[in-house]
Image (cartoon, rainbow, N blue to C red):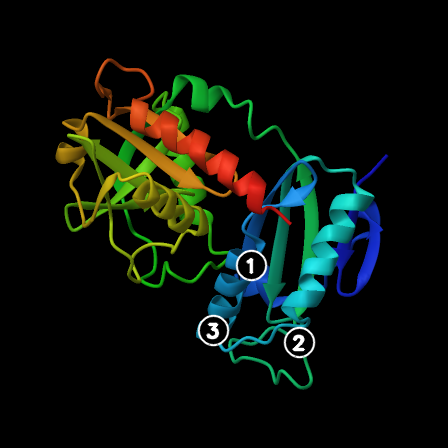
Amino acid sequence: MSRTVYVNGAYVPEEEARVSVFDRGFLFADGVYEVTSVLDGKLLDFHGHAARLERSLRELDMASPVTMDELLAIHRELVERNGVTEGMVYLQITRGAAADRDFVFPDPDKTPSTLVLFTQSKGLIDSAAARTGIRVISIDDIRWGRRDIKTVQLLYPSMGKMMAKKAGADDAWMVEDGVVTEGTSNNAYIVKGNKIITRHLGTEILHGITRAAVLKFARESQMEIEERPFTIEEAKAADEAFVTSASTFVTPVVAIDGVSLGDGTPGAVARRLREIYIDESRKAAI
């Protein structure tokens, strides 16, 4: 049985889902997206994702075709229709499909935004990566400057993941001006002397919803946090490291550019933060 997906107001089988060849998401990557995780059939951090979505839309002067309350209802309907107990809901809004290809933005009163959502059933709790940790490589960060906007311009992060795969690693951390920005699809952290160090918020990185929750839980647990840039060499000398994202929660990093961290196994801070995040997020899921 195929998935039910949502396309511009209609719930349809995925085989019947259609978007115009003139859609600006396809032609110009002129769109934004969010991914909300599902545990026990409930949504994690939905309101955080909705708030970031609204910010991304404002930064690009793009209209939302629905209210956030309507968007919540669509998420829940898709989760129910597809019987998702553990996995994700992917959402994408583009500037729509004008009559022809043109670099100039179309009139929003004449060209409605395109809204697409679909689910992915996937095990999130029982994660091999969380049990064993992941290995990352460092690559140059050559993306555009507004990484705080969650756009669908994901070609270079995809290339980064392929570079890591070719190198026998699991992912890549991107480096700009000598310091780490973030992972290809996650925020990056190191731990030194029980202090959690992660880059401060700015236009250089995505303002991770999971990042915000994890740092909140860490502070509530009396863990010390320092938000500042760090270098790859500093990361290699760290006691441990980890990444956070909506779909991977907190995942330990056990090696950077072939250099093992600590004893080469997931560190205690990352393991504990993963436990706390899952427990607290389950309690607050809607």
Q: Position of residue 32 (x, y in %)?
A: 53, 61
Label annotation for residue 182: none
Residue under label 3: 60
**Mark 2 to mark 3 CA distance (whole Å):** 17 Å
Hey, which quadrant is residue 196 in on the image?
Answer: top left
Q: Amino acid at mark 1?
A: His
Instruction: Point out which mark residue 47 bears.
Output: 1
Q: Quadrant of residue 205?
A: bottom left
Q: Residue at x 68, y 71 (%)?
A: 66
Q: Residues within 10 Å of mark 2 (few under 14, many from 20)?
A: many
Residue plotted at (37% across, 58% down) = 147
Label 2 or label 1, whichever lies nearer to me, is 1
Q: Tag 2's secondary structure?
A: loop
* Residue 22 showing in the rendered view: no
Q: Earlier in the sequence, mark 2 or mark 1?
A: 1
Q: Which residue is mark 2?
A: 98
Name the residue at the top extreme: 263
User: Which tag, 1 or 3, sits closer to the chain's start?
Assistant: 1
User: In this rendering, is residue 9 above or below 42?
Assistant: below
- Up-down: is 25 above or below 181? below
Residue pictured at 50% horizontal, 57% vertical = 48
| Residue density around tag 3, few if under 14, some if 14–19, many if 20 or more, within 10 Å | some
* Residue 213 or residue 96, whichever sits in front: 213
Looking at the rendered structure, the kind of residue marked 3 is: Leu
